[in-house]
Amino acid sequence: MRTNPPEQALHYAPGALHIHTHYSDGSGSFPEVIAAARAAGLRWIIVTDHDSLEGRDYAGWHDGVLVIVDHEITPERNHFLALGLSETVAASLPPQEFIDEVYNRGGFGIIAHPDERVANPFKAIYRWDDWQVDGPRMRDGASVGIELWNLMSDWGESLTPRNRFLHFFVPTLGLNGPTPATLDWWDRLNMQGRRTFGVGGVDAHAFKRRVPWGEAEIFPYRWIFGTLTNYLLLNAPLSNDATVATAQVYAALRQGRSYFVNRLDGDAPRITFRATRGSEQHTMGAVVAAGPEPLLLTADVGRNAFVRLIANGELLASGIRHLRQSVTAGAVYRLEAYMGGKPWLFTNPIYVTDAGQ
Ligand SMILES: [Zn+2]
Ligand SMILES: [Zn+2]
């Protein structure tokens, strides 16, 4: 069992993932994307152009912003963020095959925008078709990610010819958060011991589109970097060595030592969600054995949000900003928080196992 240091000793590193540049269908150059990330207060970004690693030369530190360059495998549907690879994986492979290939090569990945359901005049459906495919066949404890909330995908799903200008000027009207089916899938995988971490992805493109008043950018990088932000919980500050820092980011993601928040509805730069028992203290991503002594789960999201503690997919307790719940049973415990009734924050779980498991 690993005991995490208390949160006070942890370093919280905000960042964004799922970003496109002009090496695929994004409108921006790397310098533009990096400047926008810096202006948005991000410490790291993961750029994943479609089936291309052409931007690799930009990987590294850029004046306080760690730039990681990997790629998104993009067949017609079934997109996958392939991370930690030196070469691209063929998008012509079926999903199970390309996932296996990513893991065989020592990488890992994130299932992108899994639950798209709507085709409209502005977009096709890019969902993850077969939810039986949820990771490498040789799972062996390997960790896989799910993009629980994809900003562009969510916004695009509710777009209609009638509301498109309203939703362009007031984008939050078009945001609904992770779909119930996605959250349900995620909980079930973790309950089955198929270790799955959740992230929020911006899917930034800064598309330029003709509109009646000229040309509009949907949405600028600087704006979108102020939306879904993933906070990593690190034991040490990000290293000055970009290779080491990239490994720190990827390790934190794989271990589920992160949460994400929609900063449009308020930032949450230093939340706590911990399990304590005597002198033991654990946080997101930890695996803790239940024992005769109960574990105390506590949370503070730093704002007057409505907080829900989810145990094995079911609501166990709720509160405003804070939460305290004593537990003795093994379960997958995670936190969600809502601002003004809207989904706002999602943590990765603390995994409590029953004795003897
Ligand atoms: Zn995609
Ligand atoms: Zn994408």
Image (cartoon, rainbow, N blue to C red):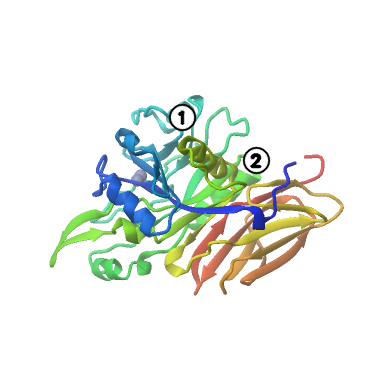
- Relative vertical location of residue 201 with respect to residue 302 in this rendering, above or below: above
Query: Residue beneath label 1, please?
Result: 102
Ligand 2 falls in quadrant: top left
Comes first in the chain, label 1 or label 2: 1
Residue shown at 53% from the left, 62% from the top: 269
Q: Residue 256 at what x, y percent from top left?
A: 58, 46
Q: Give the left or right position of residue 227, taking residue 161 as reference.
A: right
Q: Is residue 30 visible?
A: yes
Residue shown at 53% from the left, 64% from the top: 268
Q: Give the left or right position of residue 256, taking residue 28 as reference.
A: right
Q: Residue 110 at what x, y percent from top left?
A: 47, 41
Residue farthest toward the right in the current orientation of the protein: 292
- Front residue of this view, candidates 304 and 64: 64
Label 1: which secondary element? helix
Question: Which corner quadrant holds the C terminus?
Answer: top right
Residue shown at 18% from the left, 57% from the top: 209
Query: Residue beneath label 2, please?
Result: 193
- Relative vertical location of residue 57 with respect to residue 210 in this rendering, above or below: above
Label 2: which secondary element? loop
- Front residue of this view, candidates 289 and 29: 29
| Crowding at mark 2 (Cα within 10 Å: few <14, some 14-19, many 20+) | few
